Image: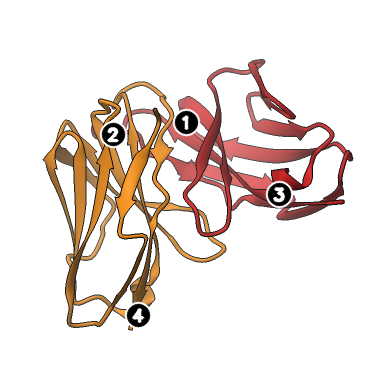
Chain colours: A orange, B red
Amino acid sequence: DTEVTQTPKHLVMGMTNKKSLKCEQHMGHRAMYWYKQKAKKPPELMFVYSYEKLSINESVPSRFSPECPNSSLLNLHLHALQPEDSALYLCASSTSVVQGTEAFFGQGTRLTVV
Amino acid sequence: EDQVTQSPEALRLQEGESSSLNCSYTVSGLRGLFWYRQDPGKGPEFLFTLYSAGEEKEKERLKATLTKKESFLHITAPKPEDSATYLCAVQAGLTGGGNKLTFGTGTQLKVEL
């Protein structure tokens, strides 16, 4: 089983709303990631969690707040977003935080900010 | 800074017409090169990992190869269901306890009957 589950699949939110994206994996992976992908562009790394601790923040604005409650779950809390934040948000996980191991991606949450 | 360049940007093939996609990379300390397939509106689907020059991996109609500067994804006798965007990504060194993937911009493949 190489499944990473993201909810919701689609989300429309106003600029003053607060919402959360959720990601779950049951593969025993200890590294989890948030990527952002704009249309016709490659995914761009936002955050890395290693053993439930934030290890990389790619200078992401504070209106995006990640959280890793346990080894299987990853959340991305959204607040006061801008229309330019509309994108496909992808969660991924991998077994190792040291070796060059593959990351498995979820199907993404399509976010539209109005 | 790690750089990944994919070519061509778009490729149209007839069913059964074999071809290759290219991924050129510039990194310091390659830990892995990855190929993913992405369908519109979906997350990338893992295909292959390559670690060292000379390595090859195969899966159905796809074969990935690696040299010190580039990787090729060979598609043999493609079918319409192979139509997708193919992404190449590199992982270089250890960055703060996590594995960062740097992606190329992808090759959009369309296979027609």
Comparing labels 1 and 4, the label whose residue is closer to the camera:
4
Badge 4: residue crowd in 10 Å (few <14, some 14–19, many ≥20):
some
Sequence-earlier tag: 3 or 2: 3
Badge 2: residue crowd in 10 Å (few <14, some 14–19, many ≥20):
many
Name the residue at 65% across, 39% down. B23
Q: Which mark is residue B83?
A: 3
Proximity of marks 4 and 3: CB atoms separated by less than 8 Å: no
Proximity of marks 1 and 2: CB atoms separated by less than 8 Å: no
Proximity of marks 4 and 2: CB atoms separated by less than 8 Å: no
Residue under disc 1 on the same chain as residue under disc 4: no
The N terminus of chain B - image quarter: top left
Regarding mark 2 in the picture, which secondary structure is present there? loop
Q: CA distance from mark 3 to mark 1?
A: 32 Å
Q: Which residue is mark 4?
A: A83
Quick check: B78 left or right of B93? right
Comparing labels 3 and 2, the label whose residue is closer to the camera:
3
Mark 1: which amino acid?
Ser
Q: Which mark is residue B28?
A: 1
Name the residue at 29% across, 52% down. A58
Proximity of marks 3 and 1: CB atoms separated by less than 8 Å: no
Question: Could you say which is closer to the camera, residue A81 or residue B99?
Answer: A81
Mark 2: which amino acid?
Gly
Q: Callout 3: residue from which chain?
A: B
Looking at the image, which residue sits at the far left?
A: A69
Residue under disc 1 on the same chain as residue under disc 2: yes
Q: Which mark is residue B98?
A: 2
- In the rendered image, which quarter is residue A5 located in? top left
Badge 3: residue crowd in 10 Å (few <14, some 14–19, many ≥20):
some
Regarding mark 1 in the picture, which secondary structure is present there? loop
Sequence-earlier tag: 1 or 2: 1
- In the rendered image, which quarter is residue A24 located in? top left
